[in-house]
Amino acid sequence: MKHFLNIDEISTKEIFKIVKTSHKLKKNYGKKYLKKKKILGMIFEKPSTRTRVSFEVGIKQIGGDVVVLDQNDSQLGRGESLKDTVKVLSRYVDIIMYRGKEEKKLYEISKVSSVPIINGLTDKSHPCQILADVMTLEEKFSDINKLNLCWVGDGNNVCNSWIHLTKHYNFNLAISCPEGCLPHERILKQFSNDKLRIISNPNEAVKGADVIITDTWVSMGMNQSLNRLKKFKNFQLNSKLVNKTEKDSFILHCLPAHRGEEITNEIIDGKNSLVWDEAENRLYTHQSILIWCLDL
Ligand code: CP
Ligand code: NVA
């Protein structure tokens, strides 16, 4: 069974195949793909706009259908365990997408499910997002292996999945986070190589960057304290910081954005913002992940 749990656990050949199919699906969008109807079950322990809508539209557009469970409208809200829920759901549906609070639970359900599980974000990772980001960069640049990428902000779940991606691509990735907000030491050690650099000063980190990537300073499930926000004061993507690249740099942000916090309006709405293409590309990437997991 082919689960889509984390990017580093999938072979380079398969990652390239998923991204290539995403481009093809975009070109042929709206053409029915499935010979036999497949049903996707989605479980949400956290809110979502893009992931939810793009998976739902994505499966429907290739000839499948969807059923959605969240805390409020299922027995999950009354304490039925996630594992029991998945054991039952996997007898009704062909594939499950799970957006969860704890990554540990993702691996637990992958062991009890009789159908493939897709990681739709956990506290530790967001692999679907990163493959859509790769697709977006491939539309803009001829070879993403030659790029200087710079992550500025919180070393969070999205940042972790970028680090996982370094297993498959040769781009340079500079990471700049305030003290105490770096990705976990274990992941930095595991993926340590010359191309992955931690540079604490954001003005230094962005130098020469072709693409700057950021995300919220307060991820879902975290406490938004004033002290925490203060730490990020110098890590905002504004024109002053972006000009420090001394290049015509492009911008990625997985959204939702907190305008005026991690990114300013002029940058997210600017001519070099790839953010809206990035959001659109979730659609084709999710179709491709579904097709890959289902071996279609
Ligand atoms: N980027 C992303 O995953 O957005 P949603 O939380 O809206 O799904
Ligand atoms: N890091 C963010 C990503 C949202 C898509 C969060 O986990 O809230």
Image: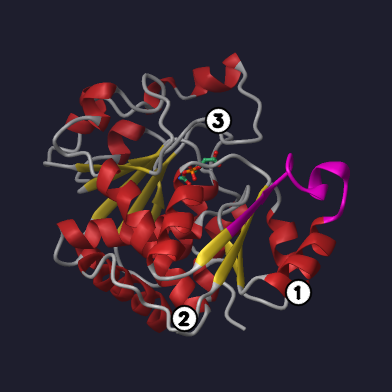
Residue 17 sits in which quadrant? bottom left
| Residue at mark 3: C-beta within 8 A of ligand 2 | yes
Query: Magenta segment range?
Result: 67-81
Residue 73 part of the magenta-drawn span: yes
Q: Is residue 119 above or below residue 267?
A: below
Horizontal side of 246 relative to 61 (left or right) equals: left
Image mark count: 3
Residue 221 x %, y % = 66, 35
Name the residue that disc number 3 marks. 218
Q: Residue at x 46, y 49 (%)?
A: 53
- Circle 3 residues within 10 Å: few <14, some 14–19, many ≥20: some
Q: Earlier in the sequence, mark 2 or mark 3?
A: 2
Q: Distance between the residues labelled 1 and 2?
A: 20 Å
- Circle 1 residues within 10 Å: few <14, some 14–19, many ≥20: some
Q: Is residue 240 above or below residue 121?
A: above
Name the residue that disc number 2 marks. 11
Work out whether residue 286 or residue 215 is closer to the camera in this orientation and state it.
Answer: 286
